[in-house]
Image: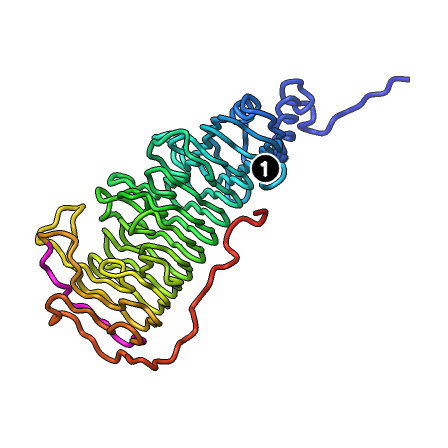
Amino acid sequence: MRVEIKLAAGWGDILNPVTMRRVLLTFIFSFPVLARDIPVADDAAFDAAAKSVQAGDTLILKDGTWAHARLKMAAEGTAQKPVTIKAQTPGKVVFTGDSRLSVGGAHIIVDGFCFQNPTGEQVIELRKDSKLLATDSRITNCAVTNDAEPASKKSGQFLSIYGARNRVDHCYLAGKTTEGTTMVVWLSNEAKDQGKHQIDHNHFGPRPKLGKNGGETIRLGDSKTSMQTAACVVEHNLFEKCDGEAECISNKSCGNLYRYNTFKAVSGTLTLRHGNGCTVEKNAFLGDKAKGSGGVRVIGEDHVVTGNYFENLSGDHERSAMCFMLGIPDSVPNGYFQVKRAKVTGNTFVNCEHNILIGQSGDKKAVLPPVESEIIGNTIQTAKGEAFDIQCAVDGVTMKDNLTGKKVAKSGRPFQAEAAGPAWK
């Protein structure tokens, strides 16, 4: 008996070997690529893994001491599937010596590392190199600390932020003794997509006095890029005994927001050094009577200082609780621009030795007083010092509805960031 099998129309083509192979490949690649956990034991293993890393992958670095490790990676994660580099156990992967971690690309997370007594010029960089910056990436739950005499006196940074929309959170940075800002946001006059970073819930621990310029804890921009809009948010951070120099925070760009931060026994100020249009809102400056402890220093245009709490600050001159600097006519970028349209409202000053100073000179060429500015609705306790120390013409400053006196009631502190820093610390 002869049996004939007839195929439905079209099936003969599908059974063609070439066609079948195409169908099979299409079927295979229609499934999502599974994210991988990749164990990394040393530098060589990291370099190998970095060459094939894909969105969603996690590189897990082995617990232990990593001496003089130079780790670089370029990766392209997504918001839903970031590329993660993390410690096997948070805080147990310890980098020492001239170690450096540099990552560039998009949607990369660095989590749980500890850098102890770094000797290099850079420690963590949100860029792989000068051409490949990081965007939409995150440094979290990390620490960079120094408790030893540095092997090198080279200037450098603990953490450098490049690119756009990156976040640094729940980190601990302390003990820097060499020249160079602890954390820097770098900007460019050519870049179209930059800034908009978030720096939050970090603990900036003690930094000893450097004895010269270059000892800031945070700097956003520099004098050359100070007219660029950075639009960064610095919030819910704790600054403790950050005494490197007069500028604990040095603002050198436009449109930044500083809010809900606590400055505890800091011998310095939040200085709006260059750039315009920044807001300082609901921060607590708790001097604890530490020598040189100050508040906010204002330079430039369109700044808002509102709802902050200043208590037990002992600084004077540019380290007063609030200081308006004199401007230089036709100032160069790294000079002093005239204060214009500043709004200082709703702040509380309690037991500060010097409250609001108007007209501090930082340069012999500085002669321009603040103009079109307002100091309105502030509460100033004057148990020891005067409410205002006026050293220039103030016809361009509106001062009204400020409550002053020895028995002015204290108002509540807007915020204290006592729990900032990595969870494992």
Residue ID at (22%, 60%): 317
Q: Is 379 part of what is drawn in magenta? A: yes
Q: Nearer the viewer, residue 241 or 271?
A: 241
Q: Is residue 353 left or right of residue 336?
A: right
Q: Is residue 15 left or right of residue 41?
A: right
| Amino acid on which the number 1 mark rests in the picture | Ala
* Residue 25 in the image, given as x and y percentages of width and height: 62, 26
Rendered view: 169 above or below 402? above
* Residue 330 in the image, given as x and y percentages of width and height: 9, 51
Which quadrant holds residue 401?
Answer: bottom left
Residue ID at (31%, 76%): 383
Residue ID at (46%, 63%): 416
User: Which residue range is magenta in the image?
Assistant: 366-381
Q: Is 143 part of what is drawn in magenta? A: no
Q: Quadrant of the N terminus?
A: top right
Residue ID at (59%, 47%): 424
**Mark 1: secondary structure:** strand
- Report the residue marked by disc 1: 87
* Residue 171 in the image, given as x and y percentages of width and height: 49, 47
Q: How is the image coloured?
A: rainbow
